[in-house]
Image (tube, rainbow, N blue to C red):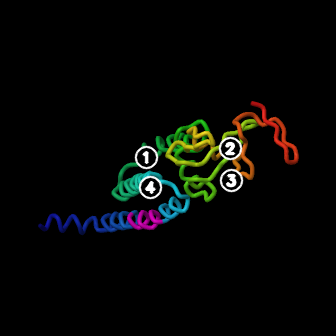
Amino acid sequence: MSIILTTILNYKFNIAITVFILLLQAAIIKFATPRIEKHTDHSRLKRDSFDKARKSLIFVSNTISIALILFVWGFDFKGLMTMSAGLLALLGVSLFASWSILSNVTAFFLLIFHKSYKRGNFIRIIIGENYVEGYISEINLFNTKLISEDKEIIVYPNILLMSHPAIINPRSRYSVVGKVVEFSNKEISIET
């Protein structure tokens, strides 16, 4: 019994910091979860979107907490720091580059918190001279499902939705999908 007590007394600072990190992690999750739920409910997204966002938050907070606890207990980060600098640069590019799959996950969180992208809103995404339009049905981790006026399901990557101009609930809707040739005052000429 005295060995356990001696060990606890020798490492009381490390134990206290570890408990503090774990309590801080729990507080962050408890504080952030209702806000994520509020934004997903406000955007009228499905419960699945909230669950994905919550699981991602827990994963990120667990990873950061483990790294901090390892640091407190004296894990040797010298070799790991060199490798992690390269990994962080690679991760930064992968999270925000338009050609990356992980950038769609980053865009997912931006879309959840953006008030204009609600389930049921009609959206026109302008891609150069072309466009895609439909009702927002779901916002998933990697893509957003749109339903066109002709009841076609369009699966559109989240990063492209964030990087192209979009018109939310436009006053007039085009009757065909195609190429916008020219705009005049109240006339729109469409090439099919």
Earlier sequence position, callout 3 versus callout 4: 4
Q: CA distance from mark 3 to mark 1?
A: 53 Å
Looking at the image, residue 44 sits to the left or right of residue 17; the answer is right
Q: Pointer 1: what residue?
A: 78
Q: CA distance from mark 2 to mark 3?
A: 11 Å
Q: Disc 3 marks which residue?
A: 169
Label 4 secondary element = helix
The kind of residue tagged 4 is: Arg
Label 4 – label 2 distance at C-alpha: 25 Å
Horizontal and vertical percent position of residue 50 = 46, 56
* Residue at the image point whose x is 58% and y is 38% from the top: 152
**Residue at image mark 2:** 125
Circles 2, 3 touching at the beta carbon (< 8 Å): no
- In the rendered image, is residue 64 in sight? no
- Seen as rendered, the residue at the extreme left is 1
As helix, strand or loop, the secondary structure at mark 3 comes to loop
**Amino acid type, label 2:** Ile
Q: Main secondary structure of the magenta part?
A: helix
- Which residue lies under the disc numbered 4? 47
